[in-house]
């Protein structure tokens, strides 16, 4: 038989006493866990309230002083204290009292020091408070000790027409490594000069010597036992001094002492290397300066440098705040240039990070690398028309370095990273000849043209020309590039007097740029003769010289060419040709387009690749009109046309056509611009796969036009000379 037991879940009984005690115990334990947090919050709130109240007390006292009658300011606090030292101006007022607010007692200290001056009649008058100081102290709710909670410092002047005193003011601050004035210990500051004073520093680590006579002063104080000071101060035993402090006018002259425990100071080591990364072994003199609090101090000057490894003893203990700068001067016969860290970078050792001259932490130990630049003075005079090695510069600035060159003949080249770098070459001689063009052997990366601005004297000098460099695709792939030189009067004067000039190359790299060498070139032919010379070979046409200008005066449908076939020219080489061209007569006809210009790889059988301008005439069949379209651009030897619309006129134009080999291709670059205007970037581009082109530079006209040519320059881009 199964027995069923029923349990009644409904009951009128409550908690037992044991259950109640257990519940209360749990609540007490939980509350005890939160009690410290609640206590901390309460103390924090109370401490914040004390700070706010102390600030209000200090501000209220200062406002009361500002609003009082000037001759009765010494009565401040008379209703609150009998502890007084009070004098109406001139004199000193010092008072203390207590104020109790919300069961908290605040100790108040008021110090007022006065100054006097003379009015126009010579009578003494009260001028101003040299200093008003209000300090409010109270018990810290966390430590139970009395501490300064708020301070107010200010200067108050009497209203009216008093003259400024014939005196000055000096504020001396003793600072700690954190940048604040030392509250403890208190320092006795002695000021000696036309007057002598001694004062103790306040809670801000300061003293103010007010309205002291003009003149030169010396300030001294003691160095606490076990403390250190930076180099550059006068030290005698445990006394540190600063001399020759001028007090000249009614302004505050700030004077700073920097003191702290030795472990707060920083240490610096340096390795001085040449351009190859080798530690130098030469003599020089180093100067270390230190900028802090708006002043520049000399840590040491002309310290003898006998090698490139400089340990912490060489630099000494350095204050952790402020900014340092290093200068190194070398003898005139040294192979190194003088170094200045404000212009030449120093690097944190084993990184590419530039050292800013500052430390990041107290007690920091830092090692830096100082790279020097060699002084390639080169020959006394450089021939402008001979190849000048880029690394033989007298002055390198910005992001420019010297490295091994991968171009033909090896050697060195300059590497330029981005913008802002420039180099200067001194004592360049043009002899008795005018420079006409400028060439440079370069390699460039990026997507846009890089630039080299050729300037006279220095970076701020007049621009003689701008060399545009289209990317070569690799810093190991070089080409020779040309630009026209605009003769400045100063260059002409130097040539007339057979003097040398300084040339600055100012770089603007799209990405990276290598410069192997550069040179200037003279004009090849200015046609100041009576007839065309034997170096030119005429292929049809009437080529004559009139008043120093070459003219082609024939018309007709044929090609008329003057090919340069001079001794020393190679028909397999890539050249650049620069020339001034002007149309004298032009008659466009339907399907018979006249052209004039310059070309490369030409001979008696073909016109090569030409840079030209033409005028094409077509028919507008809808309106039955003739359309004339003026163009400029490159034409190929197989009648390929790569032209752009350009509204030219019958003025002189510069024509420049250049060729160079890149891998299996020959590249042509061209530009045309009006004489007297600024040379532009390259305008026309064409490349061919055939690298076995032959021929020479030439001038040409075709069909019904005549033209004039002048000032021709031809450069062999394959030459290494």
Image (cartoon, rainbow, N blue to C red):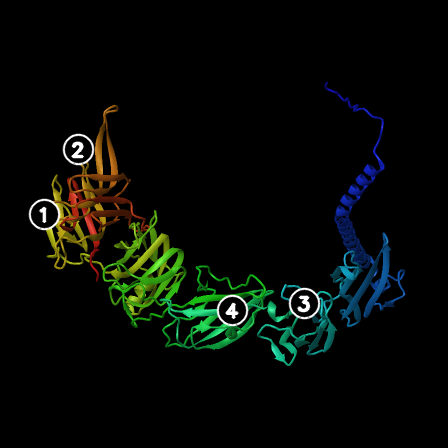
Instruction: Identify the residue shown where x is 64% and y is 77%.
Output: 241
Instruction: Identify the residue shown where x is 12% and y is 39%.
Output: 557
The foreground one among 545 and 645 is 645
Residue carrying label 2: 591
Say which label, 1 or 3, has the lower sequence index.
Answer: 3
Up the image or down, 644 lies above or below 713; here it is above
Measuring from the top left, give residue 377's x and y in whole percent: 33, 71
Distance from label 2 to label 3 (Cα)?
88 Å
Measuring from the top left, give residue 275's x and y in whole percent: 37, 66
Say which label, 2 or 3, has the lower sequence index.
Answer: 3
Look at discs 1 and 2 and give the one toward the viewer: 1
Instruction: Identify the residue shown where x is 36% and y is 70%.
Output: 375
The foreground one among 352 and 539 is 352
Q: Is residue 457 visible?
A: yes
Q: Is residue 76 visible?
A: no
Distance from label 3 to label 4 (Cα)?
34 Å
SS label for mark 4: strand
Residue carrying label 4: 268
Q: Which mark is residue 252?
A: 3
Tell me whether the residue at label 3 lies in contact with that at label 4, contact meaning CB atoms closer than 8 angstroms: no
Characterize the local packing of mark 4: few (<14), some (14-19) or many (20 or more) Cα atoms within 10 angstroms. Answer: some
Say which label, 4 or 2, has the lower sequence index.
Answer: 4
605 relative to 585 in the view: left or right: left
Q: Which mark is residue 443?
A: none
Distance from label 1 to label 2 (Cα)?
25 Å
Residue carrying label 1: 604
């Amino acid at each position: 038989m199964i027995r069923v037991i029923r349990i009644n879940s409904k009951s009128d009984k409550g908690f037992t006493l044991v259950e109640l005690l257990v519940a209360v115990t749990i609540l007490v334990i939980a509350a005890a866990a939160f009690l410290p947090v609640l206590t901390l919050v309460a103390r924090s709130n109370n401490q914040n309230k004390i700070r706010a109240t102390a600030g209000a007390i200090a501000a209220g006292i200062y406002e009361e002083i500002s609003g009082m009658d000037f001759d009765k300011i010494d009565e401040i606090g008379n209703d609150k204290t009998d502890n007084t030292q009070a004098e109406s101006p001139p004199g000193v007022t010092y008072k203390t009292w207590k104020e109790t607010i919300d069961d908290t007692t605040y100790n108040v200290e008021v110090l007022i020091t006065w100054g006097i001056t003379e009015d126009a009649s010579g009578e003494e008058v009260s001028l101003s408070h040299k200093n008003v100081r209000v300090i409010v102290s109270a018990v810290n709710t966390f430590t139970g000790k009395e501490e300064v909670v708020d301070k107010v410092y200010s200067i108050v002047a009497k209203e009216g027409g008093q003259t400024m005193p014939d005196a000055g003011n000096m504020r001396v601050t003793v600072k700690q490594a954190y940048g604040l004035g030392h509250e403890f210990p208190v320092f006795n500051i002695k000021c000696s000069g036309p007057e002598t004073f001694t004062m103790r520093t306040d809670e801000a680590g300061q003293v103010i010597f007010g309205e002291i006579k003009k003149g030169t002063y010396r300030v001294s104080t003691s160095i606490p036992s076990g403390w250190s000071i930076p180099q550059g101060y006068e030290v005698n035993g445990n006394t540190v001094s600063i001399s020759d402090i001028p007090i000249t006018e009614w302004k505050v002259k700030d004077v700073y002492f920097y003191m702290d425990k030795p472990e707060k100071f920083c240490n610096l080591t340096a390795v001085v290397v040449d351009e190859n990364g080798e530690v130098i072994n030469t003599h020089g003199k180093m100067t270390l300066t230190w900028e802090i609090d708006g002043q520049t101090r000399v840590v040491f000057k002309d310290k003898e440098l006998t090698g490139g490894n400089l340990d912490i003893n060489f630099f000494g203990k350095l204050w952790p705040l402020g900014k340092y700068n290093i200068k190194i001067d070398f003898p005139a016969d040294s192979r190194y240039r003088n170094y200045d860290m404000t212009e030449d970078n120093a690097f944190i050792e084993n990184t590419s990070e530039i050292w800013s001259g500052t430390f990041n932490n107290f007690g920091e130990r830092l090692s830096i690398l100082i790279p020097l630049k060699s002084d390639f003075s080169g020959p006394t005079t450089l021939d402008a028309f001979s190849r000048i090695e880029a690394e033989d510069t007298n002055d390198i600035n910005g992001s420019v370095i010297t490295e091994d060159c991968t171009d033909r003949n090896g050697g060195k080249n300059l590497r330029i990273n981005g913008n802002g770098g420039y180099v200067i070459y001194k004592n360049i001689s043009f002899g008795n000849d005018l420079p006409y063009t400028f060439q440079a052997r370069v390699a460039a990366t990026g997507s846009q043209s890089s630039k080299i601005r050729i300037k006279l004297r220095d970076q701020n000098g007049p621009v003689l020309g701008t060399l545009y460099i289209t990317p070569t695709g690799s810093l190991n792939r070089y080409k020779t590039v040309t630009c026209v030189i605009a003769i400045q009067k100063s260059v002409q004067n130097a040539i007339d007097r057979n003097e040398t000039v300084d040339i600055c190359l100012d770089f603007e790299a799209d990405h990276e740029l290598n410069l192997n060498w550069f040179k200037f070139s003279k004009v090849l032919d200015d046609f100041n003769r009576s007839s065309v010379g034997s170096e030119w070979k005429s292929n049809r046409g009437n080529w004559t010289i009139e008043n120093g200008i070459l003219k082609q005066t024939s018309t007709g449908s044929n090609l008329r060419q003057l090919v340069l076939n001079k001794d020393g020219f190679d028909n397999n080489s890539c050249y650049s040709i620069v020339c001034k061209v002007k149309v004298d007569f032009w008659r466009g006809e339907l399907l018979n387009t006249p052209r004039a210009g310059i070309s490369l790889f030409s001979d008696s059988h073909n016109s090569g690749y030409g840079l030209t301008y033409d005028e094409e005439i077509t028919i507008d069949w809808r309106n039955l009109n003739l359309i004339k379209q003026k163009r400029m651009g490159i034409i190929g030897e197989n009648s390929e046309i790569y032209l752009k619309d350009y509204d030219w006129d019958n003025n002189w134009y510069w024509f420049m056509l250049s060729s160079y080999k890149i891998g299996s291709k020959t590249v042509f670059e061209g530009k045309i611009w009006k004489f007297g205007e600024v040379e532009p970037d390259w305008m026309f581009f064409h490349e061919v796969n055939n690298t076995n082109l032959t021929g020479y530079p030439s001038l040409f006209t075709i069909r019904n036009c005549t033209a004039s040519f002048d000032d021709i320059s031809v450069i062999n881009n394959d030459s290494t000379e």
